[in-house]
Amino acid sequence: MKDILDQLDKRRETARQGGGERRIAAQHAKGKLTARERVDLLLDEGSFEEFDMFVEHRATDFGMAEQKIPGDGVVTGWGRINGRVVFVFSKDFTVFGGSLSGAHAQKILKVQRQAMKVGAPIIGLFDAGGARIQEGVESLAGYADIFLENTLASGVIPQISVIMGPCAGGDVYSPAITDFIFMVKDTSYMYVTGPDVVKTVTHEDVSHEDLGGYRVHALKSGVADGAFENDLEALTQVRRLIDFLPLSNREKPPVRESFDEPYREEPSLDTLIPANPNKPYDMKELILKVVDEADFFEISPDYAKNIVVGFARLDGQPVGIVANQPMALAGVLDIDASRKAARFVRFCDAFEIPLVTFVDVPGFMPGTKQEQGGLIRHGAKLLFAYAEATVPKITLITRKAYGGAYDVMSSKHIRGDINYAWPTAEIAVMGSKGAVEIIFRNQTQEQLVEAEAEYKARFANPFVAASRGYIDDVIMPHGTRRRIVKALKNLKGKQLSNPWKKHDNIPL
Ligand code: HXC
């Protein structure tokens, strides 16, 4: 009996060694942790239960029959984050470069399916060279099976991907379907085809970093929702994010006790808006001063900075915050900002996370680049996302709400539940200068100045909208937290559903 137990210990030890000491040392030398070290840091201490540690690939071509490593390049299982169940898979670069074989795919599929059954998030840690080249179509089939599970799980359980090394070829599309992608700066990169293929096809010389590093995806393409300094920071931040999310769409988001006075007043907000309407101010200051304990988990902070999105709590209730940022491009809505916010709004709606929207928007971005890039369709994404969302929607206009952007930003007209404005709000078709230049085209400069003053006095305030009931109340800035917390409480019983349909046709 003792022999058998020893044998199990030995087998386990071999599996834990992955690709062996040399490759583990190489992994560490690159500043990366191993697949198992990552899982240990992600999950509560001692909570990891591993599946399929002894799974091996079944390939025989190219001498593969003689090269078998138990676990086959991915560590899978379940554990807990702050006591709540999550499923995890972590690609092991030390085993065949973390590449995906048929057996490796089956391991991932098992945790994906279990996560759906149990109703718990799944977190994938990526560090891999794509399809197992020795396996051919077996590997392609495995990828497609994973993509299907990702798609079916979308909107049912939160799915999070962390890119912690190479993520190439077939490996990119599973993260792309998930809700959030985070990268580790300088050690991770993701692309569909690598530098060698790029060179052959387009004759471009490009490095891994310039083709798919965090600067590409967290700053330009928007594929990644954030980038962190190292493995430890990335995993710690994923733990933080999970705390805001429900485990699945079968339950409500996790309310927890708040140590921040729910009706706390913030007198400094009374002077947040500068006297000059063209002067920017930092919308994040408003967010941090309003939410519980100034705790705000921002999504995509370095992409489309003209809109700020992220998770916070108000009196313990998780909320999704969407806010125009006057500090970047005057807070205008452009293609990137519309796409970024639309995706976020849809995530919140899918998981019953109420939306709080802070509006200071001068309109949609004009210009040939934007129009040729499809601003009409991309802008419509945000409009559509807000309009179809049935979660509680609370909106506060702090300053500008001009033109179509007023309608889009969770206005009363697209089922905003509670719409507030500060006395500094200006709700109009456009800014007064632009407006009088159009309606008084042939007037003298003097007449224009006079007309502008009149337009401003007539429209650059929240009271016209309030007189029609489009704004429920004009509120004092210092009372913002109190009013929003109360609104959230009063909206707890909200029930609203959309007409039956197979699915909608959001302008993709
Ligand atoms: C099998 C692989 C592998 C792969 C790496 N390895 N990628 N084994 N299949 N796809 C192995 C290497 O042989 C090596 O084994 C070990 O992993 C480490 O690889 P290195 O090349 O030494 O590491 P590094 O220099 O860090 O380069 C990492 C890399 C490179 C950039 C990811 O390995 C690479 O370019 N790999 C191939 C990427 C690729 O083209 N994949 C296929 C994409 S097509 P030893 O034994 O020496 O440790 C695809 C189609 C699917 O995925 C589409 C589905 C939709």
Image (cartoon, rainbow, N blue to C red):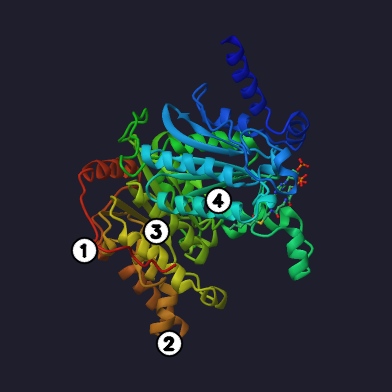
Q: Is residue 5 above or below residue 151?
A: above
Residue 399: image tag:
3
What amino acid is labelled 1 in the image?
Ser
Residue, disc 2: 443
Q: Quadrant of residue 186?
A: top right
Q: Which one is nearer the viewer's eye here, 474 or 109?
A: 109
Would you say residue 295 is visible in this rendering?
no
> How far apart are the alpha carbons under marks 1 and 3?
18 Å
Judged from the image, the secondary structure of the residue bearing numbered disc 3 is strand
> How far apart are the alpha carbons under marks 2 and 4?
70 Å
Residue located at (40% from left, 85% from top)? 440
Q: Is residue 295 above or below residue 387?
A: above
In the rendering, at what x and y percent does residue 354 appear? 32, 47
Q: Are marks 2 and 4 in contact (CB under 8 Å)?
A: no
* Local crowd size for mark 4, using a 10 Å CA cut-off: few (<14), some (14–19), many (≥20): many
> How far apart are the alpha carbons under marks 3 and 4?
52 Å
Q: Is 459 on the left or on the right of 7, as rendered?
A: left
Residue, disc 1: 467
